[in-house]
Image (tube, rainbow, N blue to C red):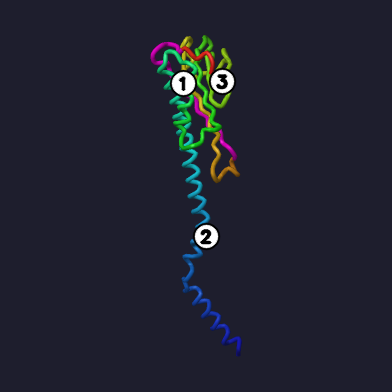
Amino acid sequence: MAIARTIPALYSLVRRFRRDSDGVSAVEFAIVLPFMVTLYLGGVELGNGLAVQFKTTLAARTVADLASQYVTIGSTDASNILGAATTVITPYSSANMVVTLSEVTVNNVGKGIVQWSCSLHGTKYPLNTQLTMPTNLQTNGITLLFGEVTYPYTPQLGYVITGTINIYQGVYFYPRLTSTVTGPSSC
């Protein structure tokens, strides 16, 4: 007899449980929350990484563009031009950023020969170093200014997964006022 009363009570309990929607949204939220947080933090990291990439490109362009406006670059001018990259990269730290400015002349086989080079936080190219030039710049006898920036980007949250990512950008500019820019005697 007890079993006969228990079965309808069990069915009643199952029906009531199926109709009861209290707490369903809390359970759904608990399931979706980790995905939402991951998506949000990933978006922030991606945004920061893209901002640093943009700033790195802008810094390389700035260095080459400023140098292209000179006929002769002295040591102080070179220091100021390279220092402009640290201003451009702001608000990000420029402590480990490497900025290099070089003048290259393309030879008859399409290689860029370094005429002079200066670097901030890095090593400048030795004189007469051969650089591989992009295909569209392999014209014999042209002289170009080559601005390079390497920025070691460490994600704020994803550094455990990716570590430091070196963002590199190199930009070529033609000298504006003369066919070649006389470089500094020392950098």
Residue type for callout 2: Ile
User: Disc 1 on helix, strand or loop?
Assistant: strand
User: Disc 2 on helix, strand or loop?
Assistant: helix
Residue type for callout 3: Lys
Q: Residue at x 49, y 39 (%)?
A: 49
Q: Which residue is mark 1?
A: 172
Q: CA distance from mark 1 to mark 2?
A: 51 Å
Q: Which residue is mark 3?
A: 124
Q: Would residue 111 be visible to someone looking at this image? A: no
Q: Is residue 144 magenta?
A: no
Q: Earlier in the sequence, mark 1 or mark 2?
A: 2
In this view, which residue lies farthest toward the front? 76
Which one is closest to the eye, mark 3 or mark 1? 3
Q: Which residue is mark 2?
A: 31
Q: Earlier in the sequence, mark 3 or mark 1?
A: 3
- Does residue 84 sit above or below 116 in this rendering? below
Residue type for callout 1: Tyr
Question: Which quadrant is home to the N terminus?
Answer: bottom right
Q: Nearer the viewer, residue 59 or 144?
A: 59
Quadrant in which residue 161 is drawn: top right
